[in-house]
Amino acid sequence: MLPLPVVKVVAVTAADGSLDRAAMRRLVDHFAELGHTRLAHVAGPAELAHTRRRAEAFAERCAELGIA
């Protein structure tokens, strides 16, 4: 086990996926506002649509903010 802080997020999924993307963007914004500049995203199975939406939103928002 790594001595790293971990946050587990379980969000309710809307039929169009909007909640997945919005929740992930808000989460990245929150950590950025706290001053965090090194974030990682550990995802579930790639064949699940919500997993892909959340991963895409995470990567997009990190890129927009210039953090990784």
Image (cartoon, rainbow, N blue to C red):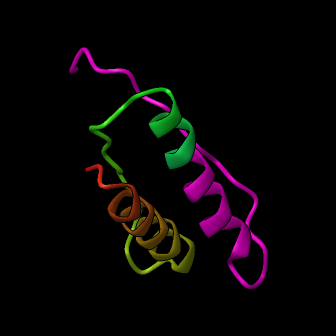
Q: Quick check: 60 above or below 62? A: below
Query: Going by the image, does 36 lie left or right of 12?
Result: left
Query: Going by the image, does 19 lie left or right of 58?
Result: right
Which residue: 21% across, 21% down?
2
Q: Farthest residue to the left: give it.
A: 2
- Residue 36 versus residue 21: which sits nearer the camera? 36
Q: Position of residue 31 (x, y in %)?
A: 48, 35
Q: Position of residue 12 (x, y in %)?
A: 76, 59
Instruction: Verify whether residue 46 appears in magenta.
Output: no
Instruction: Verify whether residue 4 appears in magenta.
Output: yes
Q: Quick check: 67 above or below 50? A: above
Q: Position of residue 53 (x, y in %)?
A: 51, 75
Which residue: 64% across, 48% down?
10
* Quadrant of the image occupied by residue 66: bottom left
Q: Quick check: 11 above or below 36? A: below
The magenta segment is 1-27
Q: How many marks?
A: 0
* Quadrant of the image occupied by residue 13: bottom right
Main secondary structure type of the part rendered in magenta: loop
Which residue: 29% across, 20% down?
4
Which residue: 22% across, 20% down?
1
Q: Farthest residue to the bottom: give it.
A: 16
* Quadrant of the image occupied by residue 3: top left
Q: Position of residue 19 (x, y in %)?
A: 72, 67
